[in-house]
Image (spheres, rainbow, N blue to C red):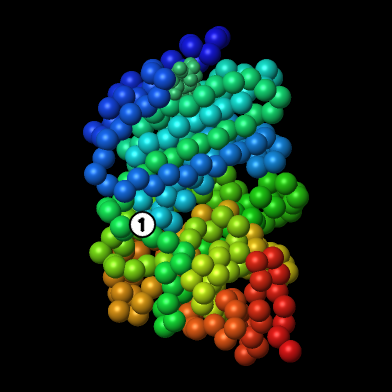
Amino acid sequence: MDEFSFINTIKQGRYNQPSLVRGIGDDAAVFRTQEDVVTAVDTFVEGVHFSKKTMSPYQTGYRALAANLSDLAAMGARPVFYLVSIVIPKIWKLNELEEIFHGMRALARNHHMDLIGGDTVSGSELSISITVIGYVDQDMARFRHTAKPGDHVFVTGTLGDARAGLHLLTEDRECDYKNVAFFKKRHQMPTPRLEFALKLADIDRVTLNDVSDGIANEANEIAEASNVCLTLYDKEIPTSEDFGQFSLKMQHEWKYFGGEDFELLGTVAEKNWNSLVKAAKDSGVQLTKIGFVTNTNNEPAVFVIENDTKARLDKKGYTHLK
Ligand code: ADP
Ligand code: MG
């Protein structure tokens, strides 16, 4: 099959978005809007970001788009379009490639997104690069630099599950763990928290960052961008029901540094807390208050309080304070 017929198999029969002027089939796509346009791109390379051993082609496509949509959620944007640049090695079969696009389409359809372009080339490793485009009301995009002293720190969902799933898929296949399918699914098909983020539209200020590298990393990014300190309570960090079956060392490592849960970490003023709770309830998402924001003494930082001791939480590690 040549490139032209391949593009025909992945092309949508009809488009959902009224702002689209021209989709696949020209030298470039065209859309028209009054809103602010939010865009992001992410690249997934076989062997680096995913492998056939841990994910089906369908899940690979689904997950690649989910990671991008999580970035749009963290910006408070409504997803509308995506473009896919794919590098295809000869050993990948046509039906596997179609499955990658089916996985993306399944998630895209849930959000009424249209595939409006891309690029198809051959090469030695499978690589999928997805560009997403979203809209947000003018000046309503959510940033990392807006956290203020007095804010609550919150997180959606539970943390560490995706990393636990990866562990079960790669290192601990034989052991007798509970709820294995749940953990694997959290790694293979994560849920970007778009609905929750979009329900915050009435709140004037909410700081958001999505959890792609672990909350230690994301909390430090908020602290640095906002020039504040974040203090988290270890016992409030939400984990799933069967997370306790893993060793304490793993639990600790995975909930702070595991990443790829694609939950939202953020801060919000006390006066808006009830609106946040309502947004979580209406979108069926767990919401947990895990800490608070203060002024910096000399530099932005993240602290964790555990059993009455306070430790500094760096992006990649944990240093106990003297
Ligand atoms: P050009 O040579 O003008 O860059 P192409 O022949 O590469 O155009 O692509 C033709 C059309 O197919 C374009 O609209 C392009 O955006 C679309 N397209 C190509 N590859 C993909 C892909 N992997 N996913 C989605 N659309 C694609
Ligand atoms: Mg051209």
* The furthest residue to the top: 1
Q: Residue at x 65, y 36 (%)?
A: 45
Q: Residue at x 53, y 13 (%)?
A: 3
The quadrant holding residue 237 is bottom right
Total marks placed: 1
Q: Which residue is mark 1?
A: 141
Rendering coords of residue 185 (x, y %): 55, 47
Mark 1 neighbour class, 10 Å CA radius: few under 14, some 14 to 19, many 20 or more? many
**Quadrant holding ligand 2?**
top left
Nearest the eye: 252 or 297: 297
Q: Can you say which quadrant of the picture contains the N terminus?
A: top right
For the question of whether residue 63 can be seen, the reply is no
Q: Is residue 33 left or right of residue 125?
A: left
Query: Could you say whether the residue bearing mark 1 is in a helix, strand or loop?
Result: loop
- Identify the amino acid type marked 1: Ala
The quadrant holding residue 320 is bottom right
For the question of whether residue 47 can be seen, the reply is yes
Q: Is residue 248 left or right of residue 235?
A: right
Rendering coords of residue 170 (x, y %): 72, 46
Rendering coords of residue 112 (x, y %): 32, 38
Decide: is 273 above or below 36: below
Q: Residue at x 50, y 83 (%)?
A: 295
The quadrant holding residue 124 is top right
Rendering coords of residue 48 (x, y %): 70, 41
Q: Can you say which quadrant of the picture contains the C terminus?
A: bottom right
Decide: is 56 above or below 261: above
Disc 1 residue: CB within 8 Å of ligand 1: no
Q: Is residue 41 left or right of residue 36?
A: right
Q: Residue at x 70, y 74 (%)?
A: 318
